[in-house]
Image (spheres, rainbow, N blue to C red):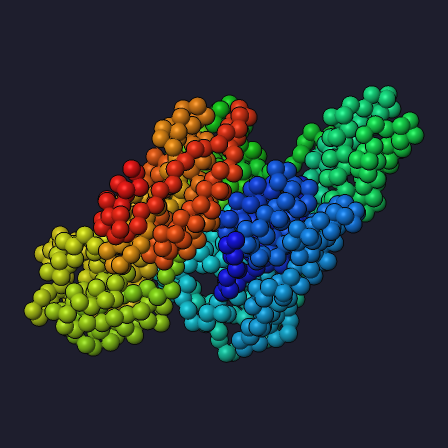
Amino acid sequence: MICRQRKAKQNLTMRILLVEDDEILSNVLWQSLTSHNYVVDVAQDGLLGWEYIQSGEYELIVMDVGLPELDGISLCQKLRSKGYSTPVLLMTAKDANQERIRGLDAGADDYLIKPLDVDELHARIRALSRRGEVIPTAVLEVEGLRLDPSSCQVSYQDKPIKLTPKEYNLLELFLRNRARVFSRSQILDRIWTFDDPPLEESVKAHIKGLRKKLKQAGVVDWIENVYGIGYRFSPKLEQSQTNQTLSSSVEQEFNQKMEQMWQQYQGLMSKRLKILNLAATEASKARLSPDLHHSAAQAAHKLAGVLGMFARETGTQLAREIETLLQTNEVLSAIQREQLIFLVDDLSNLLALEESTATTTIINQPKLLLIVNNELKNELQQLNSLREISWHQVDNLETARLWLQENCPHLVVLDLETSSDSAQNLAFITELTKRTPSVKVLVISAEDQLAQRIAIARAGASGFLVKSFTAKEIGDTVTQLLQHSRQPHYSYQENPTTQILVVDDDPIFLNAIETLLEPWGMQVTTLDQPLRFWELMQKTKPDLLILDVEMPQINGIELCQAIRNDPNWQELPVFFLTAHRDAETIQQVFAVGADDYITKPLVGVELLARITNRLERNRWLQNLSTKDTLTGLMNQPQSNRALTSLFQNNQSGCLAVVSIAENELRQINLKYGHTMGNQVLQRWSNLLQTVFRQIEVLGYYGLGEFVLGTINLNYHEMRDRTAELATSLRKQVFTAPDGERFQVEFKIAIAQYPNHGDTLQALYQFCCQ
C-alpha cells in the first residue's frame, strides 16, 4: 500500500471536493460552502470524483452515498485501500442504521442525514478540519483591521466588514504577506481554482471591490497600486473614523440566494413532481410499470434530499414517505396504491409548483446579451452558430442595465444606434469590463472612425465591427469571443525566489539595483568582474540576466553572444541597461539576441514592470514549448533533455517505458474517433501521475508512449511500482460513444542505468526490444 499523506499547506483556504449527483443539492451546498470562503470542486458521480481525487489535493471530501457509476461507500473504500487519509463526510437520505455503519466501516470520518442542516454541516467541517489541522487559525490584525481565519470574520475597530469570498481571500493574502507586491497573475495562481479561471482583469475588479468596502469601513488606501507591477498591502496609520454600517448580514444574503435558487430550480423540481404524479395516475389504474416505479422512487429520493434545505421540511417528510413506500414494495397493493395517491397529492398541493415551470427550467443564465434593434436580432437568430447559445435581447441601455442587475452574461453585443449618447455608451462599456467577473463587449457601429475606435478600445471593449459586416460575420465574432471567455487563464506556478543576475562594472549601480529589486521578492546576484561571468551564471542559474554594454575586458554584447551560442542558455531573457541611446548600439544589442533595452538613468517602476512581464511571458512560452498539451506531461524533446541530464549527473538510475500496444491507439482512433483516443491518453496520464507522484521525470513521447526516469528507485523498486501501475491500467474500462466498452492492451519495460546502457538512446532501445 502506498500511503499518501496530506501535505501541510500554506495556501489560504480549505479545499473541498463535493461529490453529489443531485444538481440542486450540489449547487446549494456549493453556494453555502463558498460563502464560508472554502474553495470547492464539484464532481457529479463516483468515478469522476475518483479522477478529481487523483488529480488534486483536498483537505476534505463531502460525498453522497447513492452516487451513479461508483457509490459513495465503494469510493470511500477505494480511497482508504489506496492510502488516502483525507477526511470523508458522507451524506445520505436513508435512515437505516446499517447504511451509516457500512459507511463508517468503509473509512468515512463522519456522516450527515438529508435534508442537511447547513449549520450542522459547517460545524462538522470545522470539527474535521481541526482534527486534520488544515486551516491556519492565527488571527491576523494590523492597526485595528482584524481577520479571523477560524470564523472567516473581518472587522475594523470592532465593526464587521462583509466581504465576498474572493475579497476575503485577497485580504488574507495581503495580510499574510505585508509589503509584498503581487502581480495579477500571481494572485490568480494563489486564489482561483481550476474550474474558476478568470481573466486578469477580474483581479482588478475584485481589488476595486475590496478597496471600496474597506474604505466604507474607514480603511482608506491600504491596498497600494504599484504601477506596472501589481498590488501590495500598505496600511496608513491615520484613518478616517467614519465607518458605514453594512446593509445586510451574511445570513440575510445567503437566505436571499437560497430563495433565488428555489425560484431558479422550480422547473427541475416540477419535472420530478410530474414523474410522481404520473406514477400515482398509473397506480390508480393498477398498471404502474417497473420502470416508472423505479423512476418515481428516484424522483422522491431527490426531492427528499433538497426540499428541507429550502425551508420546506414537510415536503421532505412526504417525499421520504413516498420513497420508502416505493422502495420497500416492488408491487403495490390496493391500499398502498391509495396511500401513494394521497401522498403525491399532498406533496403537489404543498409545493404548489406551476405546471408551466415544468417545461421552462431556468438553470443557465443567458450567455449573450444583445442590445440591438429587432431587424439585426432577427438576422442573428437565423444563424446556426448562435442557435445553441442562450441569449437575451433588449433595445436600449436603460433596459439592459435593469436586466444586468440580475444576470451576468459572458458577452454583450452593443449596437451604437440604440443610443445616441456616446458618453453614455462608453460609460456602459467601462461598467461591464469592471464587473466581477468582467463581461466582454462587442461594439457594432454604423461609422468607421479612428477616434471612435480608440475611445471604445480605451473603455475596454473586446471587439469592434462596422455595420457593413454581414450577420454571419458578426455571429462568427460572437462565437469566437464566447469561446475565448470560457478558456481557462493560463498561469504558471510561481517561483518564490526569482533569480536575477546583474553584470555591471559600476558597484554603485549594482548596489542600487539590488536595493530596488529585492523588496519585490527577487533574489539578486551582482557581478562587477565580467571574467567571472560564466562561472557565476552556471552556479546561480538565473531566470533573467541584466547586462551593461560597456565593461572592461569583456563587454555586454560579447557576453550576450556567448549566451545565445550555448543551447542550454538560448532561452534566457537578457536585458541591457546602458547610458547609450544611439541607434547603432541599440541595433547591436538586439542583433546579438537581447530581449529588451533600457536606458540609464534607470526608472525603477519601468524596470520592475518590464522584468515582471518578461518573466511571466517567458514562463508561459516555456510551458507551451516543453509540455504536451493533451496529457500535461513533458513533451518528447523536453523529456529527452531531462532524462539525459538526470542520468549524466548520477551514478545509477532506471528508465521505464509504458506504451499502448502496437497500433492499438491508431485502431481506437479509427474505430471510436480521436476524442476517445485522447480520453485514453488523459486517463493514463492521470494514473501515471498518481502512482509516480515523486518521480523525477515523467513525459509523453507521443503515439501512446510514456517515459519515466528516476534515480531514487532501484531496479526492483521500479519493478514493484510499475506492477502497481499495471494493476491499475488493467482495471481501466472505457465506454465508446456507441456504448461499447473496451480495454486497452499495454506494455511496460524497464532498463537500468548504466547496466543496460550508458546513454538514453541505449536504454530506450533496451526497453523496446
Q: Nearer the viewer, residue 19 or 142?
A: 19
Residue 144: image quadrant is: bottom right
Furthest toward the right, the residue is 335
| Image: 68 above or below 673 | below
**Viewed as shown, does residue 364 lie left or right of 321?**
left
Residue 23: image quadrant is: top right
Task: Tell me what residue is drawn at x 29 percent, y 68 percent.
Answer: 604
Task: Tell me what residue is drawn at x 32 percent, y 44 percent.
Answer: 635
> What percent of the width, then of the height, locates residue 751?
31, 47
Which quarter of the rendering shows the C terminus? top left
> What percent of the width, then of the height, locates residue 591?
13, 52
**Viewed as shown, does residue 569 lie left or right of 639?**
left
| Image: 445 above or below 102 | above
**Viewed as shown, does residue 567 lie left or right of 492?**
left
Q: Nearer the viewer, residue 757 or 682?
A: 757
| Image: 267 above or below 107 | above
**Viewed as shown, does residue 358 lie left or right of 646?**
right
> What percent of the width, then of the height, locates residue 565?
14, 53
Q: Nearer the viewer, residue 617 or 718?
A: 718
How many numbered marks does the figure carry? 0
Residue 89: image quadrant is: bottom right
Does residue 172 appear in the picture of this structure?
yes
Does residue 308 appear in the picture of this structure?
no
Task: Tell me what residue is drawn at x 51 percent, y 33 percent.
Answer: 734
Q: Nearer the viewer, residue 755 or 588?
A: 755
Task: Tell me what residue is drawn at x 77 percent, y 28 percent.
Answer: 293
> What percent of the width, then of the height, locates residue 172?
53, 66
